Image: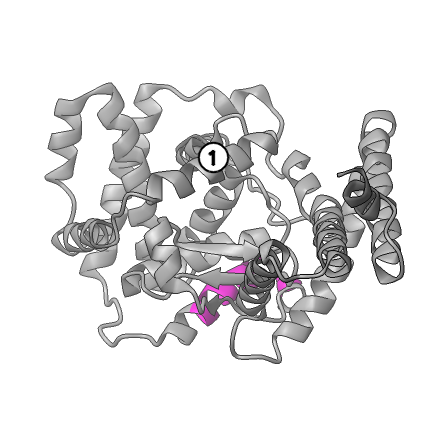
Amino acid sequence: MKNKLTAFIKPKGGAKILQFGTAFFCVLILLFQLMLLWQPQWILNFSTYCFCSTGSFLQQLTALFSFSLGDVFYVALFTSFLIGAFKFFHPKTSKALKVAILWGTLFIGSSLYTVFFVNWSLNYQKNILPQQKEIYNINQGDLIHYTLGLLKNLNDLESSNLKEEMLSTKEIYKEARNAYVEQDARFEKLLPSSPKSSLISTLLSYMGYGGYYNPFTHEAQVNAKLPHFKLGTVATHEIAHQLGVAPEDQANFIGIYIGMNSENKNLNYDANLSALLYCLNDIYQIDAELYEDLRECIPENAKNQWSEMRQFWNAYNNPLEPLFKKVFDLFLKSNRQRQGIKSYQMVTRHLISAEKYGWKPELGLCN
């Protein structure tokens, strides 16, 4: 037993290099953690610089490919892990190879975590919303007033000339990107690529996710299985992550805010509907009877879309979905989002306070 442990603790050849590499990244992570305690602003500024510089380069690189490199990266990583685990536990695998597999896995894990920590995880500590206390001074009257405004917007939009022809998926993603450029022309350069349909959309559906941002390739992936009308607001949400907005409540707010201010009526409609559903959920917690009354005021098309969305998620309902959600909830809480997965619902407070106090959010870290 002692000889076996010695072989892993004091490897030889290439495994020894992997051991030193693992130790290097572990020390680097420790130094970053200490710097975060000693000089938090310095390390946060350094993190922003890394995110913006690598993000710009990687977005230009990934824009050359029509498919998601991030999906390919994750699939390749997961496949390599399974192959490595199979060989490690196979009885015929030599001790030297097992040592190399172990230290190779630790090296890859520590290096990826270092990149993730500096390039993305620290973004959860950066707030792009105004800091005034009155932002959160939202009462029930404000919620009802804002909800009634959303209902009026939807009715007005439904009676206007919404495009009847179906936009292609790529056109929807392009409109989502253009909605940011409409707010600030600098986003033309900051967002060289549009979101992409995920190659693992079916898996995302079973996991209960509408999309995801890949911090290693800086790509915004959208679950292409979603009902067509929902693609735009999911795309604007993931673009917010591309711009460095990490907290889910803030990314959710930015995505809906951008859609509601878009010149594209279809995207505007979808964003207003998304905001309405969040508000109705809040109202239901306060007054179930008022919730039912307001539901009756929803335009017919919006009701149909809402129903289609529920049917979609019901079709992919499975016993493992709560587990995936729990893992994501723990991930968010570990990154200082106390509300965890419930932070998505906080979007109503941001939307209402933005209208009530007339402030506009920063749309990212790099502008």
- Magenta segment: does it hold 223? no
Decide if residue 182 is on the left or right side of residue 302: right
Residue for point 59% across, 54% down: 89
Kindly tell me whether residue 350 is visible in this rendering. no
Depth check: give the residue in front, 154 or 236. Answer: 236
Depth check: give the residue in front, 199 or 176. Answer: 199
Give the percent coordinates (x, y) of residue 135: 52, 25
Specify the quadrant that holds the C terminus. bottom right
Q: Which residues are magenta?
A: 173-187
Decide if residue 243 is on the left or right side of residue 297: right
Give the percent coordinates (x, y) of residue 280: 25, 34
Decide if residue 173 is on the left or right side of residue 89: left
SS class, disc 1: helix
Mark 1 Cα-neighbour bin, 10 Å: few <14, some 14–19, many ≥20: some
Give the percent coordinates (x, y) of residue 148: 25, 36
Depth check: give the residue in front, 178 or 330. Answer: 330
* Occupied quadrant, residue 225: bottom left
Decide if residue 277 is on the left or right side of residue 342: left
Task: Count the numbered circles shown.
Answer: 1
Specify the quadrant that holds the N terminus. top right
Residue for point 76% across, 52% down: 103
- Magenta segment: does it hold 185? yes
Examine the rendered structure and indicate whether residue 121 appears above or below residue 55.
above
Q: Main secondary structure of the magenta part?
A: helix
- How is this picture coloured? one colour
Residue for badge 1: 329
Examine the rendered structure and indicate whether residue 267 appears above or below residue 254.
below
Give the percent coordinates (x, y) of residue 246: 59, 44
The three-letter code of the residue at mark 1 reads Asp
Residue for point 58% across, 67% down: 76
* Occupied quadrant, residue 301: bottom left
